[in-house]
Amino acid sequence: MAVTDEAIEKIKGMIVSGALRPGDRLPKESELAAELGLSRNSLREAVRALSLIRILDVRQGDGTYVTSLDPQLLLEAMSFVVDFHRDDTVLEFLAVRRILEPAATAMAAGRITAGELDALEAQLAALGPAPSVEDLVACDLEFHRAIVSASGNSVLCSLLEGLSGPTTRARIWRGLTQKDAVARTLTEHRAIIGALRERDAEAARAWATVHIASVEQWLRTSL
């Protein structure tokens, strides 16, 4: 194992074991290096690496702290990596979204409020019957973000947010090239809202699956 990797594993071990908790300040560099049996240089490299993936927060002049370890914060790194996807992998991202998002939509059926559903309907109404592709996709992102948030599962929210980059580009491409994409998207959104109003988790799941699968199917025939 490389020295830096060993240092990362040792700091990770302290966090996982509870020796360091969210918000805790790490001991001084010299003290921590001696405690872990590491050189100060390898410890410094490990801290730098862990700060990049939001495990540690280096505060200039104040020290290094364990972050909140909130799922949304930790999964930011995934979002960054996802942005480097190749075009030929976008179907794989859509497949993952098709697995996760219907489950989140079903969970939201029992939790989303009438006020939140009213806001979603007002958002759709504001688009009008023939919105631009850009406006539709922006609305689509907010629509699904609000529903997934209503699921109450922060990990699921963060995972799906991290997948939004490549799938957004696919949705824009579809909107520009498929004749009935706008009308179909609006119809499917209204069907999802209807199922959520009825508190019908399985209907909400089914409509969310249809909605995502339609983008996936179109992309398969376009590649």
Image (cartoon, rainbow, N blue to C red):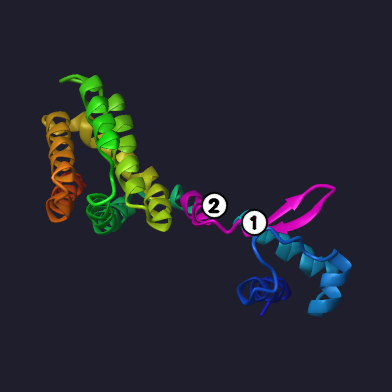
The residue most toward the right is: 30
Q: Are marks 2 and 1 in contact (CB under 8 Å)?
A: yes
Residue type at numbered disc 1: Thr
- Residue annotated with mark 1: 67
Label annotation for residue 22:
none
In this view, 8 is above or below 92: below
Q: Residue at x 21, y 23 (%)?
A: 125
Give percent across and percent down for residue 207.
14, 47
Q: Nearer the viewer, residue 30 or 218?
A: 30
Q: Residue at x 68, y 58 (%)?
A: 23
In this view, 124 is above or below 75: above
Say what secondary structure mark 2 lies in. helix
Give percent across and percent down for residue 174.
22, 36
Say what secondary structure mark 1 lies in. loop
In this view, 19 is above or below 68: below
Label annotation for residue 73:
2
Q: Which residues are magenta?
A: 55-80
